[in-house]
Structures are given as structure tokens and as C-alpha cells.
Amino acid sequence: MPKWPLVINYIKKIYNLAVAYGQGGGKRPANQLVMEWLRHRAYNDLKFKALVNGVDDGWIKYCNDRGLEFINTLPADPFFAGEKEEYDHLGATMNGHYLNLGERSDVAGWAGDLFTFYREWRHDNPGSGYEAAKEYVIDHLARPGDSRTFKLLDAIEDADGYNMALSLRLNPSRTIVQEFEDLLKPDGGYRHRFSIFYNKRFNGHRAFAASEAKALFLSNNALIAAGRTFLIEKDGLVTLPNLLPDAELDGFCDGFAEKVESLAKAS
């Protein structure tokens, strides 16, 4: 028996509660409330609240009072065998993009993961220069079964979260239940998630993907800069992006863009 209907049933249960909560006076859209339930345990600290917003605490209590079980792992992805998506990271990414907060939305998803990956790169000290930086990213980013940051699992969640949030924003009549159905059904969107993400977020251009990554590494927005520094220096001081030689940061960002493009071409 396929396991994807179990996911749909769980999302549908949350969505139905969200609709009922809204009818009782809740102010946020039901789709958004589902995202908040998915992320509320791991992505609702002060820093994430500042970046995106806090969850509706009344909504979380409403779910808990009705015995809603919190599940955090989806069945193994049918396209990438063994990769099990985690609802909390997926929900946080989706929530950030659904609210359409510009740079902050990206940091809630792929850019935040890229910042933590940057930290590992600097700790590994793989050598200096454009080529060394680019090679490191291509070799280590989005690897299957990895325990490091920005592994394949993270890339999957970043892409799915962005794609579903964008669809819901552009099509207000759609529900998050429909998004999960279209993603996970046989021959569903999971087969093309990276090509959709690459084309929708980066217009299908490697140079644009690299420039968007670099812009976030160098952003002067106080909230972005604070979050970036926190993620990069979480395990100790490393050279911050604005202090790197320009060519070295270019190599890192070009490696990211090439890796995303290769994932898109494979899907």
C-alpha cells in the first residue's frame, strides 16, 4: 500500500481543524495555520519570530486540546529513496515564502541553509581561491544521506516549501491539502521539484542564482545580517562573507548555482 495517502490524511486533519478554528474567530488563513502547526515545535524561537512571525498560540492550544498528534517525518520520498522529509523544516520554509517577506522569506528557507553550509565550509578550511570554494560546494552540497547541513533532504524541503507556498499565494482558492496531493501522488510534483524551484525562484539562470545568493551574503538589512551572523558563527568565529576576498565568495555562490542547476536538470 502506498504511504503518501497517510500524509494527505494528516494534512487534511490539520486543515479541517484550521477551518474550524477560523470559524470560531481565528484571523489567519487556514493554509497558514497548517504551516504554523508543522513548524511550531522547532521554528518558533525569538529569532525565527523576528524573521517571519510567531505562530498563533491560540491555534496551537486549539489543536493540542483536541488531541492532534504531532508527526514530524513523512514517508520516504518516492524519487529519492530513503530521504524522509521533516515537517518542521518544510513548514517553516513554506510559512516564510507564503508570507512573501522578500529576503526574509529566503532566509527562512534555502538561504538560511546556505548560511549554515557556509559555516561548515569555513570550519573545514578547504583552501582559498575561486576554484577551491566552488569545488567544495559542488562536492558537498545536497548530498544524499548526509548528516551535514544543507544535505539533499534540506534541499528537497527548501524546494517543496517554496513551490507549494508560491502556488498557494498565486492561487488563493487552492488548499494546502491539494498542494500535498499534487506533490506526492504517483507521477506527482516530487519528480520535478528542483526544476520548478530553479525556474520559479531563479528564472532558470545560473548567473541569477549566484547573484541572489551573493546578495543575501552581503545584505545590509539589519534583520538579515543579524540572522546570518548568528547562523554562521553558531559554532565559533569564522570569517564573515563581507570579509572574504570577492573571488572566493563568488566561487562559493557559483558552486551553489551550479549545484541547483544540476538538481533541476536531473528532475
Image (tube, rainbow, N blue to C red):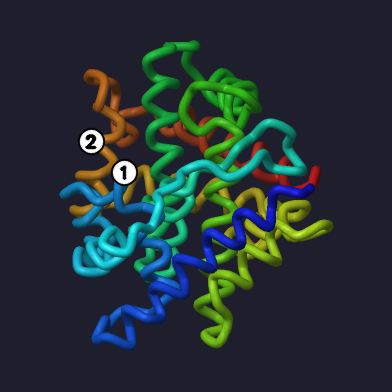
| Mark 2 surroundings within 10 Å by alpha-carbon count, few (fewer than 14), some (14 through 19), many (20 or more) | some
Q: Residue at x 32, y 64 (%)?
A: 66
Q: Identify the residue under disc 2.
A: 230
The one nearer the camera, 47 or 85, is 85
Query: Which label's residue is closer to the chain start, 1 or 2?
Result: 1
Between marks 1 and 2 in the image, the one whose residue lies nearer the viewer: 1
- Residue 203 in the image: state x and y as whole percent: 65, 63
Q: Is residue 60 visible?
A: yes
Q: Position of residue 241 (x, y in %)?
A: 34, 34
Furthest-right residue in this view: 187
- Few, some or many residues within 10 Å of mark 1 (<14, 14–19, 20+): few
Front one among 52 and 12? 12
Task: Between residue 191 and residue 175, name the one nearer to us.
Answer: 175
Residue 49: quarter of image: bottom left
The tag on residue 19 is none
**Amino acid type, mark 2:** Phe
Decide if residue 223 is on the left or right side of residue 130. Answer: left
- For the residues bearing labels 1 and 2, Cβ distance under 8 angstroms: no
Q: Is residue 14 left or right of residue 49?
A: right
Can residue 204 be seen by looking at this rendering? no
Vertical position of residue 261 compared to residue 27: above or below: above
Q: Is 108 positioned to the left or the right of 151 in the image?
A: left
Q: Position of residue 206 (x, y in %)?
A: 65, 49
- Rounded to the nearest angstrom, the CA distance separating label 1 from label 2 is 17 Å
Residue at the spot x=35%, y=28% of the render?
244
Label 1, on which residue? Answer: 42
In what element is the residue under mark 1? loop
Q: Residue at x 58, y 45 (%)?
A: 74
Mark 2 secondary-structure assignment: helix
What type is the residue that disc 1 sits on? Ala
